[in-house]
Amino acid sequence: MIMTLLNEPFFVVPIAIVVMASVLRLLRRKPWRGAKTRYPIVLAHGVMGYGELGFGKNRLSYFRGVGEHLKSRGVVVYQPQVPRTATVAERARALADYVEALEEPTVNIVAHSMGGLDARYAISKLNLAPRVASLTTIGTPHHGTPLADISAELFGGKFGLRGLLTGVGLGAFYDLTTSKQIAFNRDVPNVNGIWYGCVIGDVDPQKATLHPLLGPAAKFLRERVGRNDGLVPCKSQRWGRVLARIHADHWGEIGWSGGFDAPHFYERIAKKLRARGL
């Protein structure tokens, strides 16, 4: 009897509509439909960066379009501002103060470039560990960059201006040297209980669009240390588990260079964090 009724079109259509409506209701309830993570995401900017700048109703973010996109997917996002060119220790202090002031007891930090060093320092040296579930770094010079070595030699070795650099708040550039990072990695260990991951940016000429202003630096690094993102060697970006290797230059990693969809990539990061229960 039931099978006979199901063979009638005027029964099949209503039943199909009811089934589809039920499926849609389930999809709306399922947490895996969006990208919402268990803990909020704090986007930590790099050297010379900023959190958000306001121009009337318009907002300009260091992570271009990323915060807005993540929020549209249900993710709670914070974008702090730390001193742009200060030392890692100074920037880390500002980052730690910001996170500690949040109402949420635990956060995920997703950091670009020097922001990854700030976060590592804050977690390891400034007792921020109890507030952090994970740290994902993108294009971070964990082992320094030869470009900073050149700057340090120019301002410190030849002209004796290293003190001037730190004195006017430009200590960030010295902190990014390869020698400084050797000491940093020795003194700033990972903290047990926190998940560490990284994303490696790579401007393979055959696969990535390179911003013209980064061309000379990318060529210099390629000849000296191999593959890079235009500012940081790929080898230097590795810290913790490698989540992805992306074809993007250092600015493309945050949405400011063509050929790479940064907002959707950060959504992928959020989904990976959520899959880990973070």
Image (cartoon, rainbow, N blue to C red):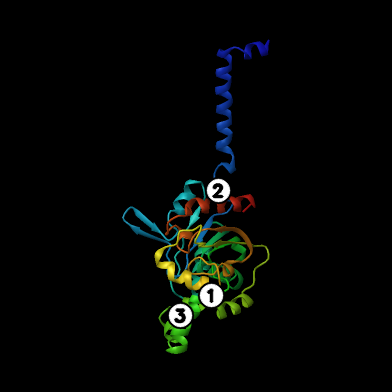
Cβ atoms at labels 3 and 2 below 8 Å apart = no
Q: Amino acid at mark 1?
A: Arg
Residue 227 visible to the viewer: yes
Foreground label between 3 and 1: 1
Between disc 3 and disc 1, whose residue precedes?
3
Return the residue at label 3.
151
Picture coordinates of residue 49, whole percent (x, y)? 43, 66
Q: Residue furthest left?
A: 56
Find numbered disc 2 in the image and state the secondary structure of the residue it sits on.
Answer: loop
At horizontal 60% and vertical 52% (from top left) the residue drawn is 272
At horizontal 54% and vertical 54% (from top left) the residue drawn is 40
Return the residue at label 1.
224
Between disc 3 and disc 2, whose residue precedes?
2
Foreground label between 3 and 2: 3
Q: Amino acid at mark 2?
A: Lys
**What is the number of the mark on residue 184?**
none
Q: CA distance from mark 3 to mark 1?
A: 16 Å
Return the residue at label 2.
36
Residue 92 visible to the viewer: no
Foreground label between 1 and 2: 1
Picture coordinates of residue 57, whole percent (x, y)? 33, 52
